[in-house]
Image (spheres, grey):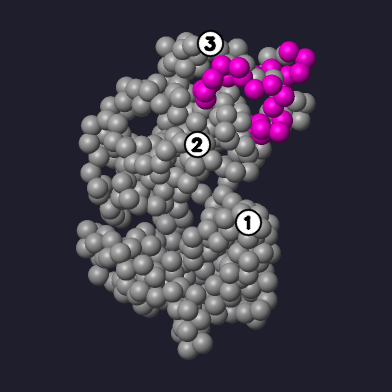
Amino acid sequence: MGDDSRGPEREAVVRRRGAARWARGHPWIYRSDVRNEPQAAGPGVAIVRDEGGRYLGRALYSPTSEIRLRLLERRDLAVDRDWWREKIARAAARRRGIEATAYRLVHAEADGLPSLVVDRYGPYLVAELLSAGLEASRTDIVDVLSDLFAPTGILLRNDSPVRRYEALPRGVELVRGRVPEDVEVEEAGVRYLAAPWTGQKTGAFLDQRENRRLAGRLVAEAVETGMGPVRALDAFTYHGSFALHLAAAGARVVAVDQSEPALERGRRNAVLGGLEGIEWVEANAFDFLRERSDRGERFDFVVLDPPAFARSKSSVAAALRGYKEINLRAMSLLAPGGRLLTFSCSYHVGREPFLEMLAGAAGDAGRPLVLERILAQSRDHPDVLTIPETGYLKGALLRADD
C-alpha cells in the first residue's frame, strides 16, 4: 500500500475559487484558497472537499508551499502503490515510438503526476521530486519505477531550487543500482554524452530533441540541392547538441558559448560522433553576434537557444529586450535564403509576445523574414492547454526572403 494507508487521512477544505480552478482544468490550489488545512501533520496525499462538503478529489499537500494542493485523482480512489503504477505506466505508454535512447517518461502536471519528472537515459532513470507532498510518496514511486522499467540505476536529481519553497533538502541521490557520470545518448544517428549527475535539468535538454532533428534535416536538404558549403552558427551551444546535428548533416559549424567547460564537453561529443566540422568558440554570445554582424559576416543557418532570460514576471520586459537584441543580430547574419531557428525557454514570456518581439526585430533589421513554422518542445514534453506551465518552450523557424 502507499501513502493513503499510513496514519490518519488528511483532509482539506477549499474555497470556491480553488474548486473552480480545478473545474477549469488546472491542478493547483494556492494557500489563499484553502479554507481548512489538513489536521494530520506533515505533507502527503489529502482528500479535498469544497465548502459544502462535496468531494473534489485527492491531491498532494505541501504545508509550507504557496501551491498547497496539486490535484492527483478526481475519483474517490486511494492513491497507493497500485495507483502510482497505473499512472506512470500510462505516461510511459504515450512515449511509444520515440526514436531516441533518451526521452522524458513523465512530464509532471502534463501527465497528471504533478511535480514528478522522470527521464530515461538508456538503461538509467533520472527523476525529480519537486514538492513536499510528492516526497512523502518517494518509496512507492521509486519502487514502481524499478518494477516497471527494471533500470540499471535510478538517480534522484533533487537539486532544483524549487525544493527550497517546499522546505525540502537539495541534493543528488542514487537510490537504485548505479548511474555513471556520463551516459551515451543517440538521437537520429547523432551521439552525445549526457551528464545525469551534473548537467542542466536531468543531464541533457531532451525538450529540444525534435527541433535538433529538424535542424539536421534542413541542412541535409540544403546540401542535397548543391547550394555549396553550408555555414551554420549555433549560439549558446552549451554541450553542442544543435551543432552536432548541423555538422552531421554536412554543415561547417561555429559553436559559441561563454563556458569553457561546456565547450570542452561539446568537443568530447564531437569526437564521440566522429564530427570534425565544428569550430568551438569561447565568447559571450551577445558580443559575438554583434561583432560578426557588424563585420557583415553571413551564415546559411543560425540557431539561437539561450537560457531563460525571464525568471519572474517582473523581468519580462528586460528579457524581451535581450531576445530582441540577439534576434536582430542573428537576422542580420543570415545569408539570402538563410534560416533562423530561434527559441525562448522562459515560461513568463508567452508565445504571442515572443512572436511580436521577432516581428519587431525583423522590422529593425530591415529584412523580409518568412515565418515557416512555429516550434515547441518535443512530444514527450506535452503542452496541456489548461496548464500553461507545461508549455514553457516556444520557438520559430524563419527564412530570409531576399
Quadrant where the N terminus sits is: top left
Toward the viewer: 379 or 1?
1
Residue placed under numbered mark 3 in the picture: 8
User: Compared with residue 237, is residue 331 higher up or lower down, i.e. above or below?
Assistant: below
**How far apart, in angstroms, are the residues tagged by discs 1 and 3?**
43 Å
In the figure, 200 relative to 258: above or below? above
Label 3 to label 2: alpha-carbon separation: 22 Å
Disc 1, disc 2: CB below 8 Å? no
Q: Quadrant of residue 139?
A: top left
Graded by Cα atoms within 10 Å as few (under 14), some (14 to 19) or many (20 or more), the crowding at tag 1 reads many
Looking at the rendered structure, the kind of residue marked 3 is Pro
What mark, if any, has residue 167 been given in the picture?
A: 2
- Spot occupied by residue 47 in the image (x, y as percentages of width and height): 61, 17
- Decide if residue 223 is on the left or right side of residue 362: left
- Of marks 3 and 2, which one's residue comes earlier in the chain? 3
Quadrant of res 68: top right
Give how far across and how far down residue 100 sits, in percent: 35, 44
Q: Three-letter amino acid code at disc 2?
A: Ala
At 49% from the left and 63% from the top, the residue drawn is: 306
Please give the name of the residue rendered at 58% of the width and 74% of the height, measured from the top-left corner. 325
Seen in the picture, residue 346 relative to 365 is either above or below; the reply is above
Of label 1 and label 3, which has the lower sequence position?
3
Mark 2 residue element: loop
Q: Residue furthest bottom?
A: 295
Checking the image for residue 349, the label placed there is: 1
- Magenta range is 27-53
Residue 22 within the segment the image draws in magenta:
no
How far apart are the alpha carbons under marks 1 and 2? 28 Å
